[in-house]
Amino acid sequence: MSFMDNVKKWMGTAKEGAADLAGKAEPAVEKAKDFASDAKDKAGPMVDRAKEKSAPVYETAKEKTVAAAGTVSAKASDITRSGVSAASGAAERAEDTASHAAGQDEDAAPDLTAGAGEDSDD
């Protein structure tokens, strides 16, 4: 007997075994289908009740989330306005300080040049 004959024999045996197993598994598959269908039918009303009971909770959570978002937005706007106001005030103070310092430098400059001419002994 050649190698190909052995392979064909094994394949024939495997086909027969698979057919037997498929025949034996068919009732179990049908039972599983029936069980799944029954479970679906029984779960349907439970799912509907769960949806009904969870709807008010969902709506309440949604309302609270929207309200909280509005509060957070308002507080963020207040903080932003306060920050802008503080930054604007700081900028004005810095500008005033710089102007004052520049004014003192201008007043001091003529004194330095006047003093330099008097002290020279050439």
Image (cartoon, rainbow, N blue to C red):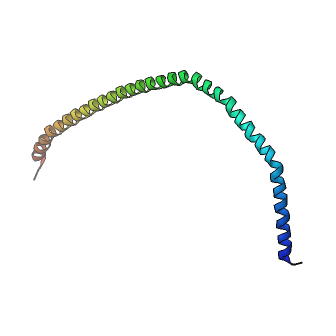
Q: Residue at x 61, y 26 (%)?
A: 48
Q: Nearer the viewer, residue 99 or 79?
A: 79
For residue 50, which quarter of the picture?
A: top right
For residue 51, which quarter of the picture?
A: top right
Q: Nearer the viewer, residue 113 or 50?
A: 50
Q: Residue at x 85, y 67 (%)?
A: 10
Residue 39 higher or lower than 71, as above or below: below
Q: Residue at x 80, y 44 (%)?
A: 28
Q: Position of residue 90 (x, y in %)?
A: 28, 31
Q: Position of residue 117 (x, y in %)?
A: 10, 47
- Quarter of the image where the N terminus is located: bottom right
**Residue at the right extreme of this rendering:** 1
For residue 118, which quarter of the picture?
A: top left
Q: Nearer the viewer, residue 3 or 8?
A: 8
**Residue at the bottom extreme of this rendering:** 2
Asked whether, in this view, residue 59 is left or right of residue 104, the answer is: right
Asked whether, in this view, residue 56 is left or right of residue 103, the answer is: right
Q: Position of residue 106 (x, y in %)?
A: 14, 40
Q: Position of residue 37 (x, y in %)?
A: 70, 36
Residue 59 higher or lower than 111, as above or below: above
| Number of numbered labels in the structure image | 0
